[in-house]
């Protein structure tokens, strides 16, 4: 999977209770913790009619940034 190949820990549907930017640590609603080097939090939802294949195409595009 693309995320694992790029050392990205993808946590879909996870609920974050706290972020400690000094300690670089995320605490999840269940109490578990995760240290991070870089953190990207995204909120929102999948938009109706969104073409999921577009995301797959962008991830495989040779001109992508990462």
Image: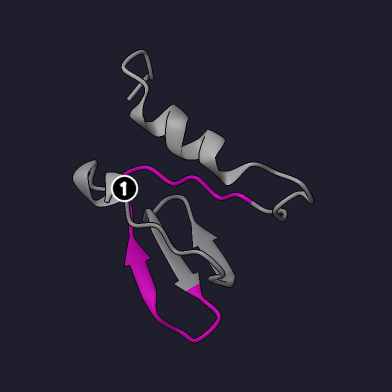
Residue 55 in picture, x, y percent from top left: 51, 37
54 in magenta: no
57 relative to 14, above or below: above
| Mark 1 burial class by Cα count in 10 Å: few <14, some 14-19, many 20+ | few
Residue 41 in picture, x, y percent from top left: 55, 50
Disc 1 target residue: 3
- Asked which quadrant contains residue 37, the reply is top left
Question: At 24% across and 51% down in the image, what residue appears?
Answer: 4
Left or right, 42 with respect to 48, comes to left
Left or right, 48 with respect to 6, comes to right
Q: Nearer the viewer, residue 28 or 49?
A: 49
Left or right, 19 with respect to 38, comes to right
Q: Nearer the viewer, residue 23 or 28?
A: 28
Residue 40 in picture, x, y percent from top left: 49, 45
**Residue found at the very far top of the displayed protein:** 63
Q: What predominant SS class does the magenta segment belong to?
A: loop
34 in magenta: yes
Which residues, given as a range, are shown in magenta? 28-42
60 relative to 4, above or below: above
Question: At 35% across and 66% down in the image, what residue appears?
Answer: 34
Residue 3 in picture, x, y percent from top left: 31, 48
């Amino acid at each position: 999977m693309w995320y694992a190949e790029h050392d990205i820990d993808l946590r879909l549907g996870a609920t974050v209770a706290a972020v400690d930017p000094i300690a670089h640590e995320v605490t999840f609603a269940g109490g578990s913790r995760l240290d991070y080097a870089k953190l990207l939090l995204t909120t929102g939802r999948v938009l109706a009619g969104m073409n999921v294949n577009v995301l797959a195409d962008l991830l495989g595009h040779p001109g992508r940034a990462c």
